[in-house]
Image: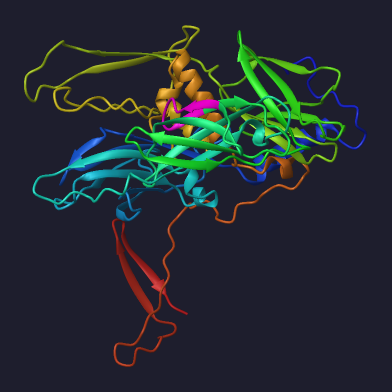
Amino acid sequence: MFFSALFTLTAQDIHPDKVIENLAIQLEVYPQEKIHLHTDRDVYAAGEKIMFKAYLVDAHTHLYPTYSRYVYVELITPDDSVVNRVMVRPMDDLFYGHLPLSANIPEGNYTLRAYTRYLENQGDDWFFKKNIRIVSKGINPLVKSNEDDYDVSFFPEGGNLPEGVFCKVALKALNSDGSPVHLSGEIVDDAGVVITSVQTVYAGMGVFTFIPEAGKRYRLKCRTDNGREKQFELPQPHPRACTLNITSKNNRLFATVQKADSAPEKGHFLFVHCRGHALYFSEWNEANETIVFDENSLPAGVLQFVLFDEQMNPLSERLVFSKNYDNVTVDFRTDKPSYMIRDKVVSMLSFVDSDGNIPLTGHLSVAITDDRDIAVDESTTILSSLLLSSELKGYIANPAYYLQDNPVSDAALDLLMMTHGWRRYNIPEVVKGNPAYPQIPYQTGQELSGQVKSLTSSRIVANSEASVMTSHGFLGLTST
Protein backbone atom coordinates (compact mmCIF):
# COMPACT_ATOMS: atom_id res chain seq x y z
CA MET A 1 0.00 0.00 0.00
CA PHE A 2 1.70 3.15 -1.20
CA PHE A 3 -0.93 5.82 -0.46
CA SER A 4 -1.54 7.01 3.09
CA ALA A 5 -5.23 7.46 2.27
CA LEU A 6 -5.60 4.00 0.75
CA PHE A 7 -8.94 2.32 1.54
CA THR A 8 -10.28 4.86 4.09
CA LEU A 9 -14.05 5.15 3.78
CA THR A 10 -16.74 6.63 5.96
CA ALA A 11 -19.84 5.43 4.08
CA GLN A 12 -21.55 2.65 6.04
CA ASP A 13 -22.84 0.65 3.08
CA ILE A 14 -19.54 0.43 1.14
CA HIS A 15 -16.56 -1.34 2.62
CA PRO A 16 -13.18 -1.21 0.86
CA ASP A 17 -12.33 -4.79 1.82
CA LYS A 18 -15.45 -5.97 -0.02
CA VAL A 19 -14.41 -4.09 -3.15
CA ILE A 20 -10.98 -5.76 -3.06
CA GLU A 21 -12.64 -9.13 -2.52
CA ASN A 22 -14.95 -8.57 -5.50
CA LEU A 23 -11.95 -7.78 -7.73
CA ALA A 24 -10.14 -10.91 -6.55
CA ILE A 25 -13.23 -13.01 -7.31
CA GLN A 26 -13.42 -11.57 -10.83
CA LEU A 27 -9.78 -12.41 -11.52
CA GLU A 28 -10.32 -15.94 -10.20
CA VAL A 29 -13.52 -16.82 -12.08
CA TYR A 30 -12.48 -15.14 -15.32
CA PRO A 31 -8.70 -14.97 -15.77
CA GLN A 32 -7.72 -13.49 -19.11
CA GLU A 33 -4.91 -13.89 -21.60
CA LYS A 34 -2.59 -11.73 -23.67
CA ILE A 35 -0.61 -12.76 -26.71
CA HIS A 36 2.38 -11.29 -28.53
CA LEU A 37 3.77 -12.52 -31.85
CA HIS A 38 7.46 -12.06 -32.69
CA THR A 39 8.02 -12.36 -36.44
CA ASP A 40 11.34 -12.55 -38.27
CA ARG A 41 10.48 -9.36 -40.19
CA ASP A 42 7.53 -7.30 -41.45
CA VAL A 43 8.10 -7.45 -45.24
CA TYR A 44 7.77 -10.70 -47.20
CA ALA A 45 7.80 -11.85 -50.80
CA ALA A 46 5.14 -14.10 -52.30
CA GLY A 47 5.97 -17.76 -51.74
CA GLU A 48 7.99 -17.15 -48.55
CA LYS A 49 7.18 -18.27 -45.00
CA ILE A 50 6.28 -15.97 -42.13
CA MET A 51 8.31 -17.34 -39.23
CA PHE A 52 6.99 -16.50 -35.76
CA LYS A 53 7.07 -17.25 -32.06
CA ALA A 54 4.02 -16.59 -29.86
CA TYR A 55 4.22 -15.44 -26.25
CA LEU A 56 1.01 -16.34 -24.41
CA VAL A 57 0.67 -15.03 -20.85
CA ASP A 58 -1.85 -14.36 -18.10
CA ALA A 59 -3.27 -10.85 -18.60
CA HIS A 60 -3.02 -9.90 -14.93
CA THR A 61 0.45 -11.17 -14.02
CA HIS A 62 2.11 -11.31 -17.48
CA LEU A 63 3.40 -14.74 -16.52
CA TYR A 64 3.47 -17.97 -18.56
CA PRO A 65 1.82 -20.42 -18.85
CA THR A 66 -1.95 -20.21 -19.25
CA TYR A 67 -4.28 -23.16 -19.73
CA SER A 68 -4.69 -22.66 -23.50
CA ARG A 69 -2.74 -25.22 -25.49
CA TYR A 70 -3.36 -23.92 -29.03
CA VAL A 71 -2.57 -20.60 -30.70
CA TYR A 72 -4.13 -19.54 -34.02
CA VAL A 73 -2.29 -17.25 -36.45
CA GLU A 74 -4.07 -15.74 -39.46
CA LEU A 75 -3.16 -13.60 -42.45
CA ILE A 76 -5.94 -11.13 -43.30
CA THR A 77 -6.51 -8.81 -46.26
CA PRO A 78 -7.61 -5.16 -45.83
CA ASP A 79 -11.22 -6.20 -46.56
CA ASP A 80 -11.06 -8.60 -43.57
CA SER A 81 -10.79 -11.82 -45.58
CA VAL A 82 -8.67 -14.61 -44.08
CA VAL A 83 -6.01 -15.70 -46.59
CA ASN A 84 -4.43 -18.42 -44.47
CA ARG A 85 -4.63 -19.78 -40.94
CA VAL A 86 -2.39 -22.09 -38.94
CA MET A 87 -2.94 -23.69 -35.54
CA VAL A 88 0.12 -24.09 -33.32
CA ARG A 89 0.48 -26.30 -30.28
CA PRO A 90 3.40 -25.97 -27.83
CA MET A 91 6.63 -27.78 -28.60
CA ASP A 92 9.06 -27.98 -25.67
CA ASP A 93 6.62 -25.67 -23.89
CA LEU A 94 6.97 -23.00 -26.61
CA PHE A 95 4.58 -21.79 -29.31
CA TYR A 96 6.41 -21.33 -32.61
CA GLY A 97 5.87 -22.11 -36.27
CA HIS A 98 5.38 -20.56 -39.69
CA LEU A 99 2.61 -19.40 -41.98
CA PRO A 100 3.26 -20.11 -45.71
CA LEU A 101 2.49 -17.50 -48.36
CA SER A 102 1.10 -18.51 -51.72
CA ALA A 103 3.26 -17.74 -54.74
CA ASN A 104 0.20 -16.05 -56.28
CA ILE A 105 -0.75 -13.83 -53.33
CA PRO A 106 -1.45 -10.23 -54.45
CA GLU A 107 0.95 -7.53 -53.36
CA GLY A 108 -0.32 -5.27 -50.61
CA ASN A 109 -0.64 -4.53 -46.91
CA TYR A 110 -1.95 -7.35 -44.75
CA THR A 111 -2.71 -7.91 -41.08
CA LEU A 112 -1.18 -10.72 -39.08
CA ARG A 113 -3.54 -11.76 -36.28
CA ALA A 114 -2.95 -14.16 -33.38
CA TYR A 115 -5.38 -15.43 -30.73
CA THR A 116 -6.62 -18.40 -28.74
CA ARG A 117 -10.14 -19.79 -28.51
CA TYR A 118 -10.30 -18.49 -24.96
CA LEU A 119 -9.43 -14.97 -26.17
CA GLU A 120 -12.56 -15.10 -28.33
CA ASN A 121 -14.53 -14.47 -25.13
CA GLN A 122 -13.40 -10.85 -25.34
CA GLY A 123 -13.67 -10.41 -29.09
CA ASP A 124 -11.34 -9.31 -31.86
CA ASP A 125 -10.26 -6.11 -30.08
CA TRP A 126 -8.01 -8.11 -27.75
CA PHE A 127 -6.29 -10.24 -30.41
CA PHE A 128 -2.70 -9.52 -31.36
CA LYS A 129 -2.50 -7.60 -34.66
CA LYS A 130 0.43 -6.47 -36.72
CA ASN A 131 0.67 -4.92 -40.18
CA ILE A 132 2.94 -6.63 -42.69
CA ARG A 133 3.79 -5.90 -46.31
CA ILE A 134 3.80 -8.55 -49.04
CA VAL A 135 5.60 -7.77 -52.31
CA SER A 136 5.35 -9.71 -55.55
CA LYS A 137 5.93 -9.27 -59.28
CA GLY A 138 3.40 -9.53 -62.05
CA ILE A 139 0.41 -9.93 -59.73
CA ASN A 140 -2.34 -7.33 -59.42
CA PRO A 141 -2.05 -5.48 -56.11
CA LEU A 142 -4.90 -5.27 -53.65
CA VAL A 143 -7.32 -2.46 -54.46
CA LYS A 144 -6.96 0.44 -52.06
CA SER A 145 -10.11 1.86 -50.52
CA ASN A 146 -11.33 5.43 -51.04
CA GLU A 147 -9.29 7.78 -48.86
CA ASP A 148 -11.27 10.94 -49.71
CA ASP A 149 -13.97 10.14 -47.15
CA TYR A 150 -13.14 10.44 -43.48
CA ASP A 151 -14.79 10.70 -40.10
CA VAL A 152 -13.94 12.46 -36.83
CA SER A 153 -14.82 11.16 -33.36
CA PHE A 154 -14.74 13.26 -30.19
CA PHE A 155 -13.69 12.09 -26.73
CA PRO A 156 -14.30 14.57 -23.88
CA GLU A 157 -11.92 13.91 -21.00
CA GLY A 158 -13.64 11.69 -18.46
CA GLY A 159 -16.44 10.94 -20.96
CA ASN A 160 -18.57 14.02 -20.24
CA LEU A 161 -18.83 17.62 -21.43
CA PRO A 162 -20.14 19.65 -18.45
CA GLU A 163 -21.51 23.14 -19.10
CA GLY A 164 -19.75 26.21 -17.83
CA VAL A 165 -16.36 24.67 -16.90
CA PHE A 166 -12.99 24.24 -18.57
CA CYS A 167 -13.10 21.05 -20.69
CA LYS A 168 -10.47 19.08 -22.58
CA VAL A 169 -11.61 17.17 -25.69
CA ALA A 170 -9.55 14.72 -27.74
CA LEU A 171 -10.42 13.86 -31.33
CA LYS A 172 -9.48 11.15 -33.76
CA ALA A 173 -9.74 11.43 -37.56
CA LEU A 174 -9.75 8.28 -39.70
CA ASN A 175 -10.16 7.54 -43.41
CA SER A 176 -12.78 5.06 -44.56
CA ASP A 177 -10.05 2.38 -44.62
CA GLY A 178 -9.17 3.05 -40.96
CA SER A 179 -5.92 4.91 -41.65
CA PRO A 180 -5.29 8.19 -39.79
CA VAL A 181 -5.98 11.58 -41.32
CA HIS A 182 -4.09 14.79 -40.65
CA LEU A 183 -6.44 17.76 -40.51
CA SER A 184 -6.77 21.29 -39.15
CA GLY A 185 -9.76 23.47 -38.44
CA GLU A 186 -11.76 25.49 -35.94
CA ILE A 187 -14.38 24.85 -33.29
CA VAL A 188 -17.33 27.17 -33.89
CA ASP A 189 -20.59 27.75 -32.01
CA ASP A 190 -24.09 27.70 -33.52
CA ALA A 191 -23.67 31.36 -34.52
CA GLY A 192 -20.49 30.60 -36.43
CA VAL A 193 -18.18 32.31 -33.93
CA VAL A 194 -14.71 30.69 -33.81
CA ILE A 195 -14.00 29.36 -30.30
CA THR A 196 -10.57 27.74 -30.77
CA SER A 197 -8.35 26.20 -33.44
CA VAL A 198 -7.74 22.45 -33.83
CA GLN A 199 -4.98 20.39 -35.43
CA THR A 200 -4.13 16.69 -35.31
CA VAL A 201 -0.64 15.97 -34.02
CA TYR A 202 -0.10 12.22 -34.42
CA ALA A 203 -1.99 9.25 -35.93
CA GLY A 204 -5.04 11.41 -36.64
CA MET A 205 -5.32 12.45 -32.97
CA GLY A 206 -5.51 15.95 -31.54
CA VAL A 207 -6.84 17.85 -28.54
CA PHE A 208 -8.46 21.20 -27.79
CA THR A 209 -9.87 23.00 -24.76
CA PHE A 210 -12.83 25.33 -24.32
CA ILE A 211 -15.66 26.25 -21.92
CA PRO A 212 -19.03 25.03 -23.25
CA GLU A 213 -21.79 27.54 -22.61
CA ALA A 214 -25.31 26.57 -21.58
CA GLY A 215 -27.74 26.14 -24.46
CA LYS A 216 -25.12 26.31 -27.21
CA ARG A 217 -24.14 23.71 -29.78
CA TYR A 218 -20.65 23.39 -31.22
CA ARG A 219 -19.15 21.87 -34.36
CA LEU A 220 -15.77 21.29 -35.96
CA LYS A 221 -15.09 22.87 -39.36
CA CYS A 222 -12.01 21.11 -40.73
CA ARG A 223 -9.99 20.33 -43.82
CA THR A 224 -7.43 17.63 -44.66
CA ASP A 225 -4.05 18.11 -46.30
CA ASN A 226 -5.59 17.32 -49.69
CA GLY A 227 -8.26 20.01 -49.23
CA ARG A 228 -11.25 17.83 -48.32
CA GLU A 229 -13.54 19.99 -46.11
CA LYS A 230 -16.17 18.63 -43.72
CA GLN A 231 -18.06 19.59 -40.56
CA PHE A 232 -18.78 17.47 -37.47
CA GLU A 233 -21.08 18.08 -34.50
CA LEU A 234 -19.54 17.93 -31.02
CA PRO A 235 -21.33 16.10 -28.20
CA GLN A 236 -24.02 18.18 -26.53
CA PRO A 237 -22.78 19.87 -23.29
CA HIS A 238 -24.61 18.62 -20.20
CA PRO A 239 -25.94 20.97 -17.47
CA ARG A 240 -25.60 18.41 -14.63
CA ALA A 241 -22.50 16.42 -15.61
CA CYS A 242 -19.20 16.06 -13.82
CA THR A 243 -15.96 14.71 -15.21
CA LEU A 244 -12.52 13.54 -14.09
CA ASN A 245 -9.50 15.60 -15.09
CA ILE A 246 -6.01 14.04 -14.81
CA THR A 247 -2.81 16.00 -15.38
CA SER A 248 0.84 14.99 -14.97
CA LYS A 249 3.61 17.24 -13.67
CA ASN A 250 6.93 16.61 -11.95
CA ASN A 251 6.32 12.85 -11.63
CA ARG A 252 2.96 13.39 -9.96
CA LEU A 253 -0.61 12.83 -11.17
CA PHE A 254 -3.22 15.40 -10.17
CA ALA A 255 -6.85 14.21 -10.17
CA THR A 256 -9.63 16.79 -10.03
CA VAL A 257 -13.38 16.76 -10.67
CA GLN A 258 -14.96 19.35 -12.97
CA LYS A 259 -18.67 19.94 -12.25
CA ALA A 260 -21.28 21.76 -14.28
CA ASP A 261 -22.97 24.64 -12.46
CA SER A 262 -26.19 22.63 -12.02
CA ALA A 263 -24.49 19.35 -11.05
CA PRO A 264 -26.07 17.81 -7.91
CA GLU A 265 -24.13 18.09 -4.66
CA LYS A 266 -23.52 14.48 -3.66
CA GLY A 267 -20.71 12.30 -2.40
CA HIS A 268 -18.21 10.68 -4.73
CA PHE A 269 -15.75 7.79 -4.62
CA LEU A 270 -12.54 7.50 -6.62
CA PHE A 271 -11.29 4.07 -7.66
CA VAL A 272 -7.97 3.35 -9.40
CA HIS A 273 -6.76 -0.02 -10.67
CA CYS A 274 -4.19 -1.56 -13.00
CA ARG A 275 -5.16 -4.79 -14.81
CA GLY A 276 -7.79 -5.50 -12.14
CA HIS A 277 -5.43 -4.90 -9.21
CA ALA A 278 -6.84 -2.20 -6.89
CA LEU A 279 -4.48 0.71 -6.21
CA TYR A 280 -6.76 3.29 -4.59
CA PHE A 281 -10.36 3.43 -3.35
CA SER A 282 -11.59 6.26 -1.18
CA GLU A 283 -14.46 8.64 -0.65
CA TRP A 284 -13.67 11.97 -2.25
CA ASN A 285 -13.21 14.70 0.33
CA GLU A 286 -15.12 17.55 -1.27
CA ALA A 287 -13.03 20.02 0.75
CA ASN A 288 -9.96 18.92 -1.25
CA GLU A 289 -10.09 19.92 -4.89
CA THR A 290 -7.19 17.68 -5.93
CA ILE A 291 -5.90 14.18 -5.14
CA VAL A 292 -2.18 13.72 -5.83
CA PHE A 293 -0.51 10.42 -6.77
CA ASP A 294 3.21 9.72 -6.86
CA GLU A 295 3.97 8.33 -10.33
CA ASN A 296 7.08 6.56 -9.05
CA SER A 297 4.87 4.38 -6.83
CA LEU A 298 2.49 3.33 -9.61
CA PRO A 299 2.85 0.02 -11.51
CA ALA A 300 3.66 0.04 -15.21
CA GLY A 301 0.81 -0.06 -17.70
CA VAL A 302 -2.68 1.34 -18.20
CA LEU A 303 -4.33 2.76 -15.08
CA GLN A 304 -8.09 3.27 -15.00
CA PHE A 305 -9.49 6.06 -12.81
CA VAL A 306 -13.24 5.72 -12.16
CA LEU A 307 -15.44 8.25 -10.34
CA PHE A 308 -18.50 6.71 -8.64
CA ASP A 309 -21.52 8.23 -6.93
CA GLU A 310 -22.76 7.09 -3.52
CA GLN A 311 -24.62 4.13 -5.07
CA MET A 312 -21.43 3.06 -6.90
CA ASN A 313 -22.76 4.11 -10.28
CA PRO A 314 -19.95 5.25 -12.60
CA LEU A 315 -19.98 8.96 -13.41
CA SER A 316 -16.68 9.43 -15.22
CA GLU A 317 -13.53 7.52 -16.14
CA ARG A 318 -10.05 8.38 -17.38
CA LEU A 319 -7.17 6.20 -18.56
CA VAL A 320 -3.56 7.05 -17.76
CA PHE A 321 -0.41 5.20 -18.79
CA SER A 322 2.43 4.67 -16.31
CA LYS A 323 5.92 4.22 -17.73
CA ASN A 324 7.26 3.07 -14.40
CA TYR A 325 8.56 -0.24 -15.77
CA ASP A 326 11.89 -1.90 -15.15
CA ASN A 327 14.40 -1.43 -17.93
CA VAL A 328 16.29 -4.55 -19.03
CA THR A 329 19.63 -4.26 -20.80
CA VAL A 330 20.25 -6.91 -23.46
CA ASP A 331 23.82 -7.93 -24.24
CA PHE A 332 24.20 -9.90 -27.49
CA ARG A 333 27.68 -11.15 -28.46
CA THR A 334 29.07 -13.40 -31.16
CA ASP A 335 32.31 -15.33 -31.19
CA LYS A 336 33.64 -13.47 -34.26
CA PRO A 337 33.03 -10.03 -35.85
CA SER A 338 32.53 -11.46 -39.36
CA TYR A 339 31.77 -14.79 -41.00
CA MET A 340 32.02 -16.59 -44.31
CA ILE A 341 29.03 -18.14 -46.05
CA ARG A 342 27.64 -21.13 -44.10
CA ASP A 343 29.88 -20.44 -41.12
CA LYS A 344 28.52 -21.41 -37.73
CA VAL A 345 27.64 -18.37 -35.60
CA VAL A 346 28.09 -18.87 -31.86
CA SER A 347 26.25 -16.22 -29.85
CA MET A 348 25.67 -15.40 -26.21
CA LEU A 349 22.73 -13.48 -24.71
CA SER A 350 22.61 -11.97 -21.25
CA PHE A 351 20.04 -9.74 -19.56
CA VAL A 352 20.53 -7.27 -16.73
CA ASP A 353 17.70 -5.48 -14.90
CA SER A 354 17.76 -1.88 -13.67
CA ASP A 355 19.42 -2.97 -10.42
CA GLY A 356 22.19 -4.87 -12.22
CA ASN A 357 20.86 -8.29 -11.26
CA ILE A 358 21.87 -11.20 -13.53
CA PRO A 359 20.98 -13.57 -14.93
CA LEU A 360 17.34 -13.00 -15.76
CA THR A 361 15.45 -16.00 -17.10
CA GLY A 362 12.59 -16.42 -19.54
CA HIS A 363 11.58 -17.44 -23.04
CA LEU A 364 13.57 -15.70 -25.78
CA SER A 365 13.50 -15.36 -29.55
CA VAL A 366 15.95 -13.80 -32.01
CA ALA A 367 15.29 -12.78 -35.64
CA ILE A 368 18.22 -12.41 -38.06
CA THR A 369 17.70 -10.19 -41.12
CA ASP A 370 19.81 -8.60 -43.85
CA ASP A 371 20.20 -4.87 -43.13
CA ARG A 372 20.79 -4.17 -46.81
CA ASP A 373 17.32 -5.38 -47.74
CA ILE A 374 15.08 -5.08 -44.67
CA ALA A 375 14.91 -2.48 -41.94
CA VAL A 376 14.50 -3.80 -38.41
CA ASP A 377 10.85 -3.70 -37.36
CA GLU A 378 10.70 -1.45 -34.29
CA SER A 379 6.99 -0.57 -34.48
CA THR A 380 5.80 -3.46 -32.29
CA THR A 381 7.65 -4.84 -29.28
CA ILE A 382 6.67 -7.29 -26.57
CA LEU A 383 6.64 -4.37 -24.12
CA SER A 384 4.21 -2.35 -26.25
CA SER A 385 2.06 -5.45 -26.83
CA LEU A 386 1.70 -6.55 -23.22
CA LEU A 387 1.51 -3.14 -21.54
CA LEU A 388 -0.27 -1.06 -24.18
CA SER A 389 -1.92 -2.66 -27.24
CA SER A 390 -3.43 -5.58 -25.33
CA GLU A 391 -5.00 -3.20 -22.78
CA LEU A 392 -6.86 -0.94 -25.22
CA LYS A 393 -9.75 -1.44 -27.61
CA GLY A 394 -9.20 -0.95 -31.32
CA TYR A 395 -6.13 -1.27 -33.52
CA ILE A 396 -3.04 0.76 -32.58
CA ALA A 397 -0.51 1.39 -35.32
CA ASN A 398 3.16 1.66 -34.31
CA PRO A 399 2.50 1.09 -30.58
CA ALA A 400 6.19 1.18 -29.64
CA TYR A 401 6.29 4.85 -30.65
CA TYR A 402 4.25 5.81 -27.59
CA LEU A 403 6.73 4.22 -25.18
CA GLN A 404 9.68 6.36 -26.26
CA ASP A 405 11.11 8.64 -23.61
CA ASN A 406 10.43 12.12 -25.00
CA PRO A 407 7.76 14.84 -24.56
CA VAL A 408 6.26 14.37 -28.04
CA SER A 409 5.64 10.64 -27.50
CA ASP A 410 4.30 11.37 -24.00
CA ALA A 411 1.76 13.82 -25.41
CA ALA A 412 0.70 11.33 -28.11
CA LEU A 413 0.42 8.60 -25.45
CA ASP A 414 -2.01 10.69 -23.40
CA LEU A 415 -4.12 11.29 -26.53
CA LEU A 416 -4.15 7.53 -27.06
CA MET A 417 -5.43 7.06 -23.49
CA MET A 418 -8.24 9.54 -24.15
CA THR A 419 -9.34 8.02 -27.48
CA HIS A 420 -9.24 4.29 -26.62
CA GLY A 421 -11.33 2.57 -23.98
CA TRP A 422 -10.49 -0.14 -21.40
CA ARG A 423 -13.13 -2.88 -21.28
CA ARG A 424 -11.46 -6.15 -20.26
CA TYR A 425 -13.77 -6.18 -17.25
CA ASN A 426 -16.90 -4.18 -16.53
CA ILE A 427 -15.36 -2.56 -13.45
CA PRO A 428 -18.56 -0.86 -12.18
CA GLU A 429 -20.32 -4.23 -12.09
CA VAL A 430 -17.30 -6.00 -10.60
CA VAL A 431 -17.11 -3.44 -7.78
CA LYS A 432 -20.77 -4.13 -7.00
CA GLY A 433 -20.08 -7.87 -6.80
CA ASN A 434 -21.41 -8.87 -10.24
CA PRO A 435 -18.47 -10.64 -11.93
CA ALA A 436 -18.39 -11.72 -15.57
CA TYR A 437 -17.80 -15.36 -16.57
CA PRO A 438 -16.21 -16.73 -19.76
CA GLN A 439 -18.50 -18.42 -22.27
CA ILE A 440 -15.72 -20.24 -24.14
CA PRO A 441 -13.48 -22.55 -22.06
CA TYR A 442 -9.72 -22.94 -22.43
CA GLN A 443 -8.84 -25.15 -25.38
CA THR A 444 -6.72 -27.82 -23.75
CA GLY A 445 -7.08 -30.55 -26.38
CA GLN A 446 -8.57 -31.53 -29.73
CA GLU A 447 -11.99 -33.08 -30.15
CA LEU A 448 -13.10 -35.25 -33.04
CA SER A 449 -16.76 -35.74 -33.91
CA GLY A 450 -18.65 -37.17 -36.86
CA GLN A 451 -20.86 -39.97 -38.12
CA VAL A 452 -20.27 -43.38 -39.66
CA LYS A 453 -22.62 -43.93 -42.61
CA SER A 454 -23.35 -46.86 -44.88
CA LEU A 455 -21.78 -46.65 -48.34
CA THR A 456 -24.97 -47.85 -50.00
CA SER A 457 -27.83 -46.24 -48.08
CA SER A 458 -26.09 -43.25 -46.40
CA ARG A 459 -27.72 -44.29 -43.14
CA ILE A 460 -25.90 -43.87 -39.83
CA VAL A 461 -24.31 -47.17 -38.74
CA ALA A 462 -24.53 -47.61 -34.97
CA ASN A 463 -21.91 -49.46 -32.89
CA SER A 464 -19.37 -49.39 -35.73
CA GLU A 465 -15.62 -48.99 -35.48
CA ALA A 466 -13.37 -46.55 -37.33
CA SER A 467 -9.67 -45.74 -37.36
CA VAL A 468 -8.13 -42.28 -37.73
CA MET A 469 -4.47 -41.82 -38.58
CA THR A 470 -2.54 -39.02 -36.82
CA SER A 471 1.14 -38.08 -36.62
CA HIS A 472 1.32 -40.20 -33.45
CA GLY A 473 -0.26 -43.30 -34.97
CA PHE A 474 -3.79 -44.68 -35.25
CA LEU A 475 -6.77 -43.86 -33.03
CA GLY A 476 -9.55 -46.38 -32.59
CA LEU A 477 -13.07 -44.88 -32.50
CA THR A 478 -16.43 -46.46 -31.80
CA SER A 479 -19.71 -44.89 -32.96
CA THR A 480 -22.89 -45.00 -30.94
Can the viewer see residue 387? no
Query: Which quadrant of the figure has residue 361?
Result: top left
Q: Residue furthest left?
A: 341
Q: Is residue 71 above or below residue 39?
A: below
Does 477 sit left or right of 472 as displayed? right
Query: Looking at this view, is 228 or 141 the one in front?
Result: 228
Counting the numbered discs, the total is: 0
Estimate the x, y position of residue 255 in percent, counting from the top left.
Answer: 70, 21
Q: Which residues are magenta?
A: 196-206
Nearer the observer, 458 or 44: 44
> Can residue 276 be seen here?
yes
- Where is residue 237? Give x, y as percent: 69, 38
In the rendered image, the residue lying farthest to the bottom is 457
Residue plotted at (44% across, 82% down): 463
Q: Position of residue 454 (x, y in %)?
A: 34, 87
Residue at (33, 28) in percent of width and height: 365
Q: Is residue 255 left or right of residue 456?
A: right
Q: Which color scheme is applied?
A: rainbow
Residue in view at x 10 percent, y 22 percent: 343
201 inside magenta stretch = yes
Q: Is residue 205 magenta?
A: yes
| Left or right of residue 132, residue 337 in this image | left
Where is the N terminus found, in terms of image quarters? top right
Measured as percent of width and height from the top left, residue 327 is found at 46, 14
Q: Is residue 182 above or below residue 337?
A: below
Identify whether 252 is placed above or below 107.
above
Q: 24 or 204: which is nearer to us?
A: 204
Q: Residue at x 82, y 34 (%)?
A: 262
